Amino acid sequence: MAIYIIFGILMFGVLIFIHELGHFLAAKKCGVGIYEFAIGMGPKILSRKGKDGVIYSLRLFPIGGFVSMHGEDDDKNIQNDETSLAKKPIWQRFIVISAGAVMNILLGLIITAFLVIFGGDLLSTKVDEFFVVNKDGVPYTEDFQGLKPGDEIIKVGSRRINIRHDLVYEAMNIVDEPRDLVVIRDGEKVLIEDFYFPTIIDRGIKFGTANFFIPTVLQKTPLEVIKQTFCQSLSVLRAIWTSLIDTVKGRYGAEAISGPVGVVSEMKEVEETGGITSLFFMMMVISMNLGIVNLLPFPALDGGRLLFLIIEAIRKKPASPKIEAAVNTAGLVILMALMLFVTFNDITKLL
């Protein structure tokens, strides 16, 4: 387990570094002064002042990081300085604040490209053969609810299917509900009405599955690699957004939510079942998840700060620094409480 703890710390360290590097580079480009660029929280372990006047530090607890900028968080001593973040145009502040989340999403895109190029086979949505069996235990060979070998699935309900990831994620969210399929059969579009995806139960949660047929394998041409990279990334982003909505709706209980401890505990199982590529896939999903969550309009997150900028643009004047600070402090307290709850939940699942 120790090796997975080390890998987990390194992984989260990289994700945090990339996130804060986004803020740092954007701030530098926009001429915002920077006091400190820190990885981790708590007491400093290592600290060095660069030639640019910025303090670069590594802190004890690997649970976050920050870029401390001039004019940030009601820094009255430099609010009117030309290097102050508060004095920059709204569009520049928007770039600086959103840059961290954007960098996490870009990292996810880069990891996806790596997995597409060096990972396993690229699978299509074209049916090669079925391996699902009927109620008598006999495999389907020629027809499964109207779907036939050679059919290429291009649409599920109203959702366009570009790659197999689209089909997998769409099927996951369909539980015991029929959907119309559109397939390409012998060069023509064919409608298959009221198709039911088989279901599975994982950790007490019921999902639909597309793993009832063997798909054909695609060649890794440059154009296919580019298509798969972008389409897979979009599928993951959509899946993250959908899962957030489903969590709020109550589809997923507390047992399905994991924090850093839970992620580390999952690494051993992931590595044993899928190898190193599965660990990188996990890192990609977490990176994109970090980017999406940080853009949510919640106090203390980057999205909460962006919301204040939008309000400022509408009102033509900034919100009261005291009000903004109070809202962000309350949001931070809620996030810390949630972190403690998730960590406790992870530990109880390990016991």
Image: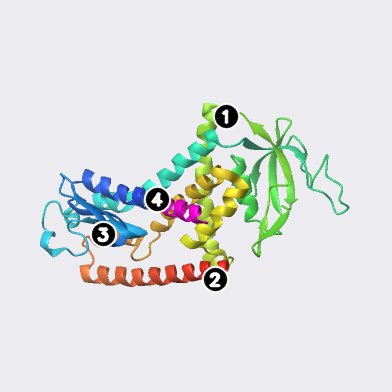
Residue under the image location 59 percent in, 39 percent down: 162
First of labels 4, 1 by sequence position: 4
Which residue does the numbered mark 4 point to in the structure image? Answer: 15
Contact between marks 4 and 1 (CB within 8 A): the answer is: no
In the image shown, does 315 or 19 lie closer to the viewer?
Answer: 19
Q: Amino acid at mark 1?
A: Lys
First of labels 1, 3 by sequence position: 3
Q: Is residue 124 rendered to the left or right of residue 196? A: left
In the image shown, does 151 or 289 lie closer to the viewer?
Answer: 289
Residue under the image location 22 percent in, 71 percent down: 322
Task: Check disc 1: other Cα within 10 Å, few if <14, some if 14-19, many if 20+.
Answer: some
Label 1 sits on a secondary structure element that is: loop
Task: Specify the quadrant that holds the C terminus.
Answer: bottom right
Which residue does the numbered mark 1 point to in the structure image? Answer: 220
x, y percent for residue 145:
79, 47
Which residue does the numbered mark 3 point to in the structure image? Answer: 44
Q: Residue at the top extreme?
A: 221
Which residue does the numbered mark 2 point to in the structure image? Answer: 348
